[in-house]
Every structure is written in structure tokens, then in C-alpha cells.
Amino acid sequence: MRKEDKNLVISQIADNINEYPHFYLIDMAAMNAADTSALRKECFDAGIKLMLVKNTLLHKALENATGDFEPLYDTLKGTTAVMFCNIANVPARLLKEKVKAGVPSLKGAFAEDGIYVGADQLEALASLKSKEEVIADILTLLQSPAKNLVSALQSGANNIHGVLKTLSERPE
């Protein structure tokens, strides 16, 4: 590969790193062509950009990108593919289903401004909540006291109405 081509690939990878807020490094070495094709299709359907890269080019792209990705440098051995995404937990959930068969394995990830290294971090990454999920949880928590208040007021009105009705029907 010529130096100009390498520089172009490095800049493309660095642009993807800067464009997408989250990325995962996975090892796809043990996957056959059919499994790789199926994984690519599932990634496309989930909104994940999957890219097979050379480790040296990815290392240079990580150095050129904004952010400190030094803990991920040690994971750049063997065959590496990068999964770029906008929602942090989507690739982890996809990988969690696939890893049951043993491949692909997680090397490392940059998600929610944190760096995760090793396949044992997959469970933690899958349990991360997306921005939309956190907002929904906050809205639920904010609505709960209001719902309780409305419910208490309605039940109180029913109780008062029942007491007044009983008193009015009582013989004197």
C-alpha cells in the first residue's frame, strides 16, 4: 500500500472516530465468511458501521483523533474490526448474542467517555443506558409523585362523597 493510500485510510478512520461518539474493537479472526456476512448485515440493520482495519493504521488514527485512547493500544493485535455507533449499548447487546458461539470477541471499547478493555467488560457495556433510556427513567421518576398526588386527591374525594351519601341516607 502506498503512503498516500495509507494516509487516506488513516484520515478516514480518524474521521469516523471523531464523528461517532462510541466505538468497539472486536476480534473477528475465527469467523468464517458466512458468519462475517451475517454480522455485517446485523450491524447495518442496527445502525452500526463495521470496518475491518489494519492495526498499525488504526493506531495512527487513534493518535490523530481527538481524545486519549492510549489504553486501547495494547488491544491492537491480531485481526481487528471497529464498530462505530451513536448509541453506546447497541453493539454490546449485539455482541452479547453472538459471543455465545465464541466469536467475535471484544478487545476494547470507547463508550460514554470511558474506555473498556477486555472481553469481560461486555456485560458492563451491555448494561449501559442510552441517553434516551436515561431521559425516560428521569421522566418516570418525575411523574411518579404527581401521579401519587392525583390518585390521593381522587380517592379522598370519593371517600368524602361516600361519607356524605351515607350520612344523608341515615334515618334521623
Image (cartoon, rainbow, N blue to C red):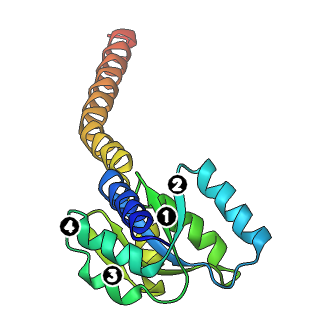
> Is residue 148 shown to the viewer in this render?
yes
Q: Nearer the viewer, mark 4 or mark 2?
A: 4
Distance of mark 2 from mark 3, alpha carbons?
Answer: 20 Å
- Three-letter residue code for mark 2: Ile
> Helix, strand, or loop for circle 2?
loop
Question: Quick one: label 4 or label 1, which is nearer the N terminus?
Answer: 4
Neighbor class of circle 2 (other Cα within 10 Å; few <14, some 14-19, many 20+) is many
Q: Which mark is residue 48?
A: 2
Kind of element beneath mark 4: loop
Q: Amino acid at mark 3?
A: Leu
Question: Could you tell me how far apart the alpha carbons at marks 4 and 2 are, in whole angstroms?
Answer: 21 Å
Q: Which residue is mark 4?
A: 67
What residue would you read off at disc 1?
83
Kind of residue at badge 4: Gly
Q: Which is more toward the observer, 106 or 82?
A: 82
Residue behind mark 3 = 72
Q: Earlier in the sequence, mark 4 or mark 3?
A: 4
Where residue 42 appears, as percent x and y from the top left, is 66, 56
Q: Earlier in the sequence, mark 4 or mark 2?
A: 2
* Residue 4 in the image, given as x and y percentages of width and height: 39, 64
Vertical arrangement, residue 117 with respect to residue 47, above or below: below
Q: Which comes sooner in the sequence, label 2 or label 1?
A: 2
- Residue appearing at x 34%, y 28% in the figure: 155
Mark 4 to mark 3 CA distance (whole Å)? 12 Å
SS of the residue under disc 3 = helix
